[in-house]
Amino acid sequence: MKRLFLSLSLILTVICAVAADAVGWTITLVDNNTDHPSVKITAKVNPGYHLYSVDNPAGGSMPLSFYFDTKGCQTVGQTVADKKYKTEYDDIFEVDQHFYDGTVVFTQKLKPTAKDFSVNVEIQGQACNDTGCVQVGDAKMLKGSFAAAKEEAKEEAKTAEAAEVAPLTEMTDSLQSAEPILTPEANLSGVAADKSWWDNVEAELRVFEDAPEQQSRSLWYIFIAGFIGGLIALVTPCVWPMIPMTVSFFLKQNKSRSKSVGTASIYGLSIIVIYVVLGLAVTIIFGASALNELATSALFNIIFFLLLVVFAISFMGGFELTLPASWTNKMDSKVDTTTGLLSVFFMAFTLVLVSFSCTGPIIGTLLVEAAATSNFVSPAVGMFGFALALALPFTVFAMFPTMLKAMPKSGGWMNTVKVVLGFLELALALKFLSVADLAYGWRILDREVFVSLWIVIFFLLGVYLLGKLRFPHDDEVEKTGVARFMLACISFAFAVYMLPGLWGAPLKSISAFSPPISTQDFSLYEGEVHAQVDDFEEGMRLAQQLNKPVLLDFSGYGCVNCRKMEAAVWTDPDVKASIDNDFILVTLMVDEKKALPEPIKITEKDGTQRTLRTYGDKWSYLQRSKFGANAQPFHVIVDQNGHPLAPSFVYKEDIPGYKAFLEMGKTNYKKEKK
């Protein structure tokens, strides 16, 4: 028995020694005898160990927990770390573990409610190294005093009842409870948030852009800007899937040449009416950021992912998309009187909805004017120009199928075209699933999975074009024509081109479709630009600490132009070096679905009351309220007080122009400091 007791004692001694060697704790009370004391907890994680964060995912190591038993005081907000945790995939637990190493300081704010107060602090957690894991923690009783606590608490209560808190003050206060995202070398404990960082600077931006008359822009200017935006939208990947859908729909319309022209015209007019009416209605009811919210909605993207998959299967001959026979008979009997306008309008409405994922950010620039002013004529004219540019080509597509049917012989090539379009629909459908996956952080369609699926799809497309793969309605291919052979070569070449992407190659040609490289678990590519911070206030604080200007990057998970610009411009070695060395890069995702610690009530420029519930809501509001813009990508360089140092830079794959943009910001910052 004695030996057993000695053995147990020895084991407990070793365990305690190991735990003590893993993490050293220091717990102190700072700012005592003030109205805002804090508990400061310093964890010194010894080399080789990982201390797991408060929000370590379920299924992983034991997360860190803080318990505060207070008397005569209250805790304010959450316990905040002075640096961002690191993330690493754990093969054993099969989750992304969140951990700290080195030294990390946690701060818990207190509010005294009595002259003398005390707080009992208890810490529980786990630290692991390559050989195993140990329970870590500490406990300590802290005492403090604040003579004026009762009187000040009463005075604050009266003030809160008598006046409303300004929106930006609420926003700044709420940030105190959010865990900051910082670079490891930063120590920002002495840098406070500044409400002026949120001040509107549109006038200062216009000075840089040499456009002081911007407020009095003519309707013609707005119409042309909207028309150009519509032309840009035509080349976005969200609009491409609608081309085969339009062709397939109007192929079934058995009408004369004159009637087909009329129906196609109604189709184009419907697109214009739907865009103008729906866009303005959404702006009036929900605000200027509603289109971005819809475009990144999981439900919206999953519905259209499934819709495109269904269309792809139909094109490949899996089944025929037809109305019930009774409906068809009634429609056939009244075709001369009804002209099928309802179905044409529905087709136009489908085009508008599917294209929202890419066109939403573009038309957001026009809609923000409606949200910022009481003049709804200007955005209406801009929306008309946008919809007109988008509708004209689709009107031609609607007329084109009748011309094809008028040809004497169509042959089996028509079904081949439909099957090829089915392959393309299947590939493009993954884009919608990817947007939802990125916005909500599901991580089911990371970049290597996406690229793998595309490689398989385009390889099989090449096999099909060579006649080695047949679908239900295909004719047997006795000889491979030159056109089919050339298209098969292109498809095979494209599949081979994407192979290096499995190891992290940029694949610039598909950057608008695929998830960013940051979602790839294994990558040999080192040319990607990474944001130091993804929180506005913390970025401004870090800029003050490191004495650098801030490059704000308003982006989005569903923003295809953002991915294209990052792949085309930020991968340039000179651009990357300048961003990494001369600026604090702050990337703000306007479609981030992570909930704020507390909802924030704000007032838009037109007096509309809104509630910001996610970080995406917050960054979208920042872009609108501070810079008067709503489209992404939107890059702007500001100093440490939030004032612009150069004109904004929107979507443009222009490396020399972007270098000049960075150089101007850097030069003006140096002048300002002198």
Image (tube, rainbow, N blue to C red):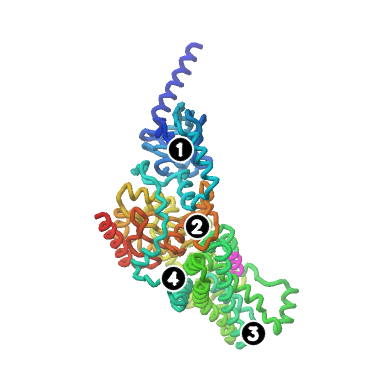
Q: Callout 4, which amino acid? A: Ile
Q: Which mark is residue 384?
A: none
Q: Callout 2, which amino acid? A: Asp
Q: Which residues are magenta?
A: 307-316
- Distance CA(mark 2)–CA(mark 1): 30 Å
- Is 310 contained in the magenta span? yes
Q: Determine whether the residue tagged by mark 4 lies in a helix, strand or loop.
A: helix
Query: Which residue is drawn at the image coordinates 48% and 58% (left, top)?
Result: 621
| Lower sequence index among marks 2 and 4 | 4
Q: Which residue is mark 3?
A: 255
| Lower sequence index among marks 3 and 2 | 3
Tell me where residue 11 appears, x and y as whole percent: 45, 21
Q: Determine whether the residue tagged by mark 2 lies in a helix, strand or loop.
A: loop
Query: Which residue is drawn at the image coordinates 32% and 55% (left, top)?
Result: 549
Nearer to us of marks 1 and 4 is 1
Q: Callout 1, which amino acid? A: Lys
Q: Can residue 125 be seen in this snapshot?
A: yes
**What is the magenta segment's predominant secondary structure?**
helix
Q: Quadrant of residue 218?
A: bottom left
Query: Which residue is drawn at the image coordinates 55% and 80% (left, top)?
Result: 395
| Lower sequence index among marks 1 and 4 | 1
Q: Which residue is mark 1?
A: 109
Camera-side residue of 671 and 533: 671
| Lower sequence index among marks 2 and 1 | 1
Camera-side residue of 517 and 151: 151
Camera-side residue of 87 and 643: 643
Q: Determine whether the residue tagged by mark 1 lies in a helix, strand or loop.
A: strand
- Distance CA(mark 4)–CA(mark 3): 36 Å
Tell me where residue 535 appears, x and y as whole percent: 42, 51
Q: Which residue is mark 2?
A: 591
Specify whether 54 is left or right of 404.
left
Q: Can residue 512 be seen in this snapshot?
A: no
